[in-house]
Image (cartoon, rainbow, N blue to C red):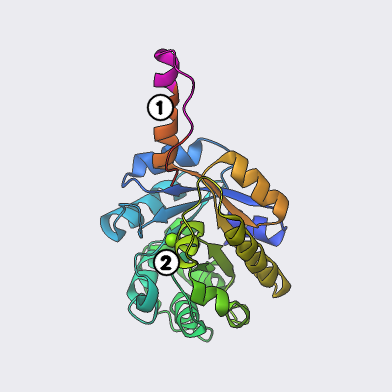
Amino acid sequence: MASHRLLQAFRSSKPAFGAWLTIPSTWVARTTAAASSNITWLVIDCEHGLIPLQPGASDIVAAVAGLGSNAPSVLVRIPATGPCADGSATWQIKYVLDAGAKGIIVPMVSTAAQARSVVAAARFPPKGNRGFGNPFTHLSWGLSPLEYLQQANDNIVVLTQVETRQACENIEELCTIDGLDGFFIGPYDLSLSLGFPPPNPDPHPEVEETLLSILDAAHKAGKKCAMFCTSGRQAAQRAEQGFDMINVTSDSGALTDGVRSQFATAAGEDTPQGGFGY
Ligand code: 3PY
Ligand code: MG
């Protein structure tokens, strides 16, 4: 079965909650994956997290896949950004998909040409130019090599981030790209690019308007729209608004919040508000 939990949620139009992995550890990843049956997906963050592609992302993909068919779908946010999304990100996309990732998120994609190069790198011919021949990939999916080749194009999730003013200006054209499943809004970078402070914890009202307009454009074009949040409260609101894929917390954020809160209780202090929640 090439399907996976994030794709099943997308196909049944149910909001898919997930978590961000920033700590380079297979055990942190497995512990996070097993912490809640409400975790539909995990993103290995090789852009701002400290997880390298190898060893790192490839090991985490295998470690989570080892939890069985109900394990969260593992996507990788690749390190290359901005202009690098044209061409030089290709090997990174190939590497993480060959490692068995169920999808990719490419940051700072602002133009249709960049987004097309991302799609081409992630899809086998005739839809793209991804090469075939890795001896391990199919194992993470529980498929034979031939089944993987036949089913990968329809089951790999390809998302580009909308987090620049230029991407907002180009949103209608980005919405027309075949093979791109949708957009992942990065509210921190989007706020900065639009000249506002980062969310604290919620975005500035003008940024809020922009991100709702991205959601609307994506849905009108039949694309999915994902949102980065840093708490369950925010995530529940985003699900209400109609976002399809919503980050709830991160390994490092949850660890910090949990330790801070227990120590505050021990010291007889009020539970402090979360700080920079990324
Ligand atoms: C951002 O907010 O800029 C992001 O990329 C979220 O991950
Ligand atoms: Mg960002």
Residue 51 visible, this angle: yes
The residue that appears at 44% across and 32% down in the rendered structure is 257
Badge 2: residue crowd in 10 Å (few <14, some 14–19, many ≥20) = many
Compare residues 155 and 189 and report the one nearer the observer. Answer: 189
How packed mark 1 is, by other alpha carbons closer than 10 Å (few <14, some 14-19, many 20 or more), is: some
Residue closest to the eye, 37 or 131: 37
Numbered badge on residue 186 = none
Position in image of residue 17 (x %, y %): 59, 48
The residue carrying mark 1 is: 260
Horizontal placement of 54 versus 152: left or right? left
What residue range appears in magenta?
262-273
Give the SS element for disc 2.
helix
Quarter occupied by residue 213: bottom right
In primary-sequence order, the first of circles 1 and 2 is 2
Q: Is residue 15 left or right of residue 263?
A: right
Q: Amino acid at mark 1?
A: Arg
Tag 1 secondary structure: helix
Looking at the image, which is closer to me, 207 or 156?
207
Task: Give the image quarter of residue 1.
Answer: bottom right
Q: Which mark is residue 97?
A: 2
